[in-house]
Image (tube, grey):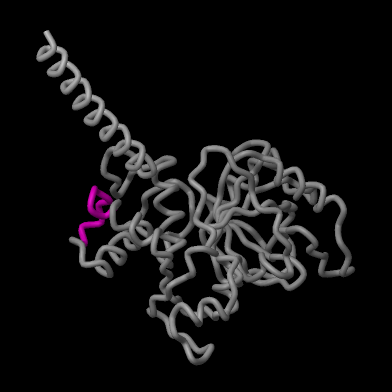
């Protein structure tokens, strides 16, 4: 009887170990899903992938949850840099390497990067980055891999409930959303998303819809009629998500001529100002605060 009880306890212990190990593995794999991600995949797992690749310095063209050509190319580059089979498919080995690199806190320097911008992006200091990488000067070159001090970096959130950053335009957003970069804008009220290009702007971001299709989506949130009305929006760019406000009236100069949008429009962030009067627009700021309370 005692021998039978011993066998039963041993079996129970084994089953507990097996199932605990299984569920632990599933939970870890859950950040990118249980299945391979590939060209054409869509959804939250793709957003997690895009956010993490962007964090590591690989441009996915935005955090829109669509595994398109730019995300595919970013995966290929990541695989090549880490001696993986460059097939563009995010399987077990690629997922494991992503987790490893995120834990290490590495960043690949891109054209236009400075230590100041990188330190600002990850909430650390120039001195900490230089010390971690044994840098003697502030000069860095594209392609170099930097170690970001793990105790200080802000890893991209994968939590289901979080809020956009109500970040200051002057000290944060204008550097995180630089001229010439593409962002994904999501209208808080309707949930409609479209891509925009930041063409310029000093006191705030002057932007253009990227394509005619993006213009059509943007016009839809205004009921088919362009308007100066302020709308609460979320701006996803370079792995970060900001609370913002926009108007919907084409005006001024443009750089894109085939998007059915004659001019540009304005996107405001916390503490940004108008260009004409150099004042903080209360309606825009109220919309920014509405966006900041939106769960994403």
Q: Quadrant of the C terminus?
A: top right
Residue 88 falls inside the magenta stretch: yes
* Residue 95 on image: x %, y %: 30, 51
User: In the figure, 247 relative to 1: above or below?
Assistant: below
Q: Nearer the viewer, residue 86 or 138?
A: 138
Q: Is residue 190 left or right of residue 96?
A: right
Residue drawn at the location 62% of the way across and 61% of the way down: 208
Q: Is residue 229 left or right of residue 41?
A: right
Residue drawn at the location 80% of the way across and 61% of the way down: 271
Specify the farthest residue to the bottom. Answer: 136
How would you classify the magenta stretch by its main secondary structure? Answer: loop
The quarter of the picture where residue 147 lies is bottom left
Residue drawn at the location 31% of the way across and 36% of the way down: 26
Bounds of the magenta segment: 86-94
Residue 183 falls inside the magenta stretch: no
Q: Nearer the viewer, residue 82 or 59?
A: 82
The quarter of the picture where residue 133 lies is bottom left
Q: Quadrant of the N terminus?
A: top left
User: In the figure, 145 relative to 168: above or below?
Assistant: below
- Counting labels gives 0
Q: Is residue 173 left or right of residue 137?
A: right
Residue drawn at the location 82% of the way across and 69% of the way down: 275
* Residue 155 on image: x %, y %: 50, 56
């Amino acid at each position: 009887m005692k021998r039978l009880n011993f066998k039963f306890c041993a079996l129970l212990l084994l089953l507990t170990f097996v199932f605990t190990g299984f569920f632990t593995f599933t939970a870890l794999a859950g950040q990118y899903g249980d299945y391979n991600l590939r060209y054409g995949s869509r959804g939250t797992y793709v957003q997690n992938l895009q956010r993490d690749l962007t964090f590591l310095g690989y441009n996915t063209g935005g955090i829109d949850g669509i595994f398109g050509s730019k995300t595919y190319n970013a995966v290929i580059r990541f695989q090549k840099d880490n001696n993986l089979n460059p097939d563009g498919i995010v399987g077990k080995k690629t997922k494991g390497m992503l987790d490893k690199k995120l834990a290490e806190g590495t960043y690949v320097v891109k054209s236009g990067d400075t230590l100041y911008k990188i330190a600002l992006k990850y909430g650390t200091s120039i001195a900490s980055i230089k010390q971690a990488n044994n840098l003697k000067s502030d000069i860095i070159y594209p392609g170099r891999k930097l170690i970001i001090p793990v105790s200080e970096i802000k890893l991209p959130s994968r939590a289901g409930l979080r809020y956009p950053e109500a970040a200051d335009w002057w000290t944060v957003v204008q550097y995180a959303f630089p001229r010439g970069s593409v962002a994904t804008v999501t209208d808080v009220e309707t949930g409609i998303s479209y891509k925009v290009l930041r063409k310029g702007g000093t006191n705030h971001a002057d932007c253009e819809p990227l394509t005619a299709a993006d213009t059509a989506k943007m016009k839809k949130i205004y009921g088919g009629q362009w308007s100066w009305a302020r709308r609460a929006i979320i701006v996803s760019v370079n792995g970060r998500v900001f609370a913002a406000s926009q108007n919907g009236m084409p005006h001024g100069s443009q750089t894109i001529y085939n998007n059915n949008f004659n001019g540009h429009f304005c996107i405001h962030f916390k503490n940004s100002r108008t260009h004409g009067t150099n004042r903080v627009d209360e309606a825009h700021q109220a919309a920014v605060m509405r966006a900041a309370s939106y769960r994403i």
